[in-house]
Image (cartoon, rainbow, N blue to C red):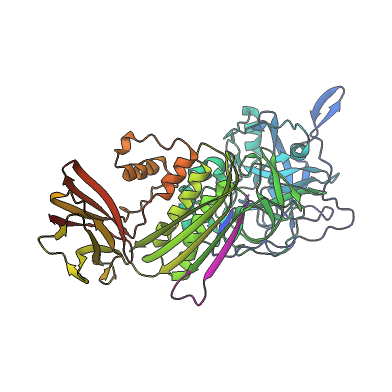
Amino acid sequence: MASRTWRSVAGATSTVALIAGGIVAVSFAAPAQAAPGDDPCPAAYPLTQTVGGSTVSNLTAGQPVTGLTSVDSGPPVEFTGEYVGTIDNGIADGLDMLVFDLEGPRITNADGTVDAGNWAGISGSPVYDDATGALIGSVSYGFTSALSPRAGVTPATYIYDLTAPGYSASAQAPATVKASRAEAAAIARASSNPAPLGTGHVLEPAKQVSGVNAALANTFAKKSPLLQKKSPALAGGFRAGAGGGGSDVDYPIVPGGSIALTASTGTITTGMVGTVTAVCGAQVFAFGHPANFTGTSTMTFNGAQTVTIQEDGIFSPSFKIANIGRVKGVINQDRVQGVVGTLGQAPSAATVTTSATAPRLAAPRVSSTSVSEQEALPYVVASQIGSDAISALNQYAAGDALMSWTITYTRSGSAGVKTFKRTQRYSTSQGFPELVAFDAASDVEALLTNGFEKVRISSVAVSSSLQPTYRAVKPSRAQYYSKGTWHWVGRNGIKAKRGSTVPVRLRVVAADADSVARPAFTSQTKVKISKNARGTGKLVFEGQASSGYSEDDEFADDDLLALLLAEETGEDDEEYEGPSNLNELLDLLSSQQRQDNAVGTLTYKTKRGKVESERTVRGPSVVKGTLKVRLTFKK
């Protein structure tokens, strides 16, 4: 295709890229100012016209078009194209897909060969009719995973329909779309890389995450069944990006300029970066295909700045890298033909605040993220805790933490604001950021997916005291207190007077060769002996450290909850039917033992039968293993 001149149009192409928390910078250039006469909300190009009483296509093969997209930190640039054909029902039932061959910066090279082709993040780039300046649609679909300049365009008539009452868009789009044999043959003949083309696919977002390592972000995203079910586009595949820390750069929202759809902003920024198709007053249209396909939406949208287009086409399509700026409004509709949001609309968001202390920190590390999508909360909580652990300790392997969290929420079955609080201790020789983040995120997910009442979380606050070493302990010996002195329990155990109370404590040592724990004593507990005790008894202390963390564990997994309750009640987990209401679920979560506890079970006999009771001592770190203490009774 030969390049052609066209009237100056303000804007930049769309880019679809997910932004969660990340370490690598990404930026979007501020688009150029519109020249006089340019319209950010042009009329939609009519797809058909009436000729001799018959309705025919208003597009002709080879019809020239010009579009706008963003390829670097400068203003949006023009690309050109030619109409190839239309795939009937190619987007969804009743929604046709327009097919164009494109040419221009980063799409093709100067000699016409393919450069980056259609990249992840180009979605939403507006395409205009050269003759009238009307908006034909947005670049939104591709036909191959290889580098290609061929694109599927969502017609502007469908995109503008997003704000119409009772719009007629199909409720769902098929996973693939098929052209007729004639269309496929026509498209193949016109292709610069001839091959039968029977399907089209959404130009997937180039997902980015800031504020946390991308690999860790993907791990946490996959652990949330809620995120995978409600927001599958946010459930993994992140690349490191920029925009964390509550970026307040005011990148403008203009046609052809970059836009980020965000589920969270702040320390952990997660979203999808795409291109603005049109701005009609306060209404912003983008993408030309679904983001999360939720219908109504609460995601925020932000201005963004392109850094560069990274060509790929081997392991994935080429993709855009970008910076994310300040929140500019709220996405209201997320439908098959695109997304639309309202500039200036304030989001209803939950806040995740974490504070971490560590030996290398002069002051506590405080992090904060605003989360507009409730289903993203477990993932954000885990990512922020994990990020704090990495930043505070500057390592990924060993660690020790005392952590407390408070979840503030409302529930449909009870008036007023509620709070849930829990404290836990962790210590491990490997994978510390993943381990330490799991329980708090799991509690959040359990509340949101409780199945009994609608719960909305307004805030999650986490406080952590971190150490860079593995400090697990195990009980080695026991002491009892008598006549003003602590005595070691010997081979014959404790000789306890019937009807007396005996203070007991444990001496703990390093749990294994990797632990750096030094010998210490636990807190003490009082063992009360019945005056009717007979024979001998036993006191068995068991450390409450969990058996370990599995990469396959999911937040709020039903099997995990079943096991927890079985452990609390001593029942076989196969007999557990689960909590029957939200209150029972909350009791289950709050009753979980701290891992730095050792629970002692006292057992002996009286004339009336067996007596069994429990008491707890607390160690300096997580407690593993067991210790048995024998009791003999005297008058």
- Give the image location of residue 588, x and y in percent: 41, 45
Q: Give the farthest residue toward the bottom.
A: 362
Is 118 left, or right, of 381 in this rendering?
A: right
Comparing 460 with 33, the one in front is 460
- Give the image location of residue 375, x and y in percent: 56, 46
Is 279 left, or right, of 291 in this rendering?
A: right
Is 237 left, or right, of 346 in this rendering?
A: left
Whether the magenta-drawn stretch holds residue 422 is answered as: no
- Give the image location of residue 491, x and y in percent: 10, 62
Name the residue: 36% across, 43% down: 565
Comparing 574 with 420, the one in front is 420
Tell me the quarter of the picture where residue 620 sits.
bottom left
Is 426 left, or right, of 539 in this rendering?
A: right
Q: Is residue 375 above or below residue 629?
A: above
Name the residue: 75% across, 31% down: 166
Q: Give the farthest residue toward the top.
A: 53
Whether the magenta-drawn stretch holds residue 371 is answered as: yes
Can I make out residue 146 in this image? Answer: no
The total number of labels drawn is 0
Can I make out residue 37 in this image? Answer: yes
Q: Bounds of the magenta span? A: 357-372
Comparing 98 with 304, the one in front is 304
- Identify the image quadrant of the C terminus: bottom left
Tell me the quarter of the picture where residue 71 sits.
bottom right
Tell me the quarter of the picture where residue 426 sits.
bottom left
